[in-house]
Image (cartoon, rainbow, N blue to C red):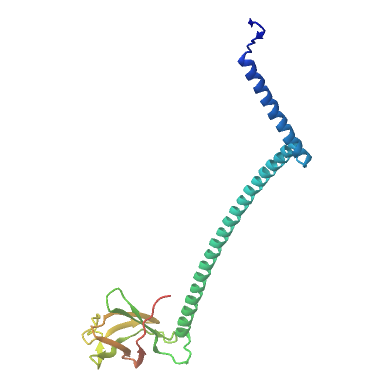
Amino acid sequence: MRTGQLVVRYHSSWRRRAVLIGLGVVGLIAFYLVYEWGRFDGGYSKFAELQRRRELATQIETLSGENEKLRAQAAAAELAREVDRRAYAEVEKTLAQLQAQVLKARAELTFYRGIVSPEDGIGGLRIQRFQVTPSAIERGYTLLLVLVQSMRQDAVVSGAVSITVEGVSDSRPVELTLAQLGAQTRDDGSAPFKFRYFQNLEQQIVLPEGFEPRAVNVEVRSPRLAPVRESYPWQIHTES
């Protein structure tokens, strides 16, 4: 449009925007190139970085595999230790049982040796063993008496055993018989026996309240032999 000498031109707005955007993109690219050149000039390489990342990833994968192997080996070693521990415990248990059997066998050997050949060389009737063991009854006990006769005496021996328990009740000395302690005895308070080589006699007793036992007196009588008398301190025997 012309008005006298004045010329007015109209430019399209989208072209201006396109130019500005293009300049901005060129500026960003230039900035990035300058940035990359600066890093390259400082010794940084994008390719080297990518290569290093690949190497690190490979190392991580390798280490992960080795870690899994080590975990598996550790689990196997722990299992082996547990197996060894259980096997050792089983061996110890078996060894303890064998030792108990050996001790029992020795005790039995000593017992039978005392029958066949007494240490003092004197045959006849004797008390081989006396023990007091607790029973299931409150204040109840079992008196175990083992009588033996030398095998050189082949005849059957018979007789009776009298047992009394000495103790203290109400600060006074007291002596109680088997009958007073609730044992099953004959009318005279004794327990009969009859054997050829040996016999175990057991008597179940119950101590009265307030009675503190101190000793046990045993007397073994036989019509054909001299009586045997022994006194034992009150000691409770427990099975090991």
Q: Is 217 situated above or below 71?
A: below
**Residue at 55% across, 62% down:** 85
Q: Quadrant of residue 24?
A: top right
Residue 83 place in picture, x, y as percent? 56, 58
Left or right of 186? Residue 99 is right
Q: Is 196 situated above or below 89?
A: below
Taking the view exactly as shown, the residue that stands out farthest to the front is 4
Residue 87 place in picture, x, y as percent? 55, 62
Q: Quadrant of residue 187?
A: bottom left
**Residue at 61% across, 16% down:** 13
Q: Is residue 96 visible?
A: yes
Q: Quadrant of residue 137?
A: bottom left
Q: Is 134 situated above or below 62?
A: below
Q: Quadrant of the N terminus?
A: top right
Q: Is residue 162 visible?
A: no
* Front residue of this view, candidates 94 and 211: 211
* Front residue of this view, candidates 104 and 31: 31
Q: Is 49 situated above or below 11?
A: below
Left or right of 149? Residue 216 is left
**Residue at 67% across, 20% down:** 19
* Front residue of this view, candidates 230 and 44: 44
Residue 121 place in picture, x, y as percent? 47, 92
Residue 229 place in picture, x, y as percent? 34, 92
* Front residue of this view, candidates 217 and 221: 217
Left or right of 16? Residue 189 is left
Q: Quadrant of the C terminus?
A: bottom left
Q: How many marks?
A: 0
**Residue at 72% across, 30% down:** 30
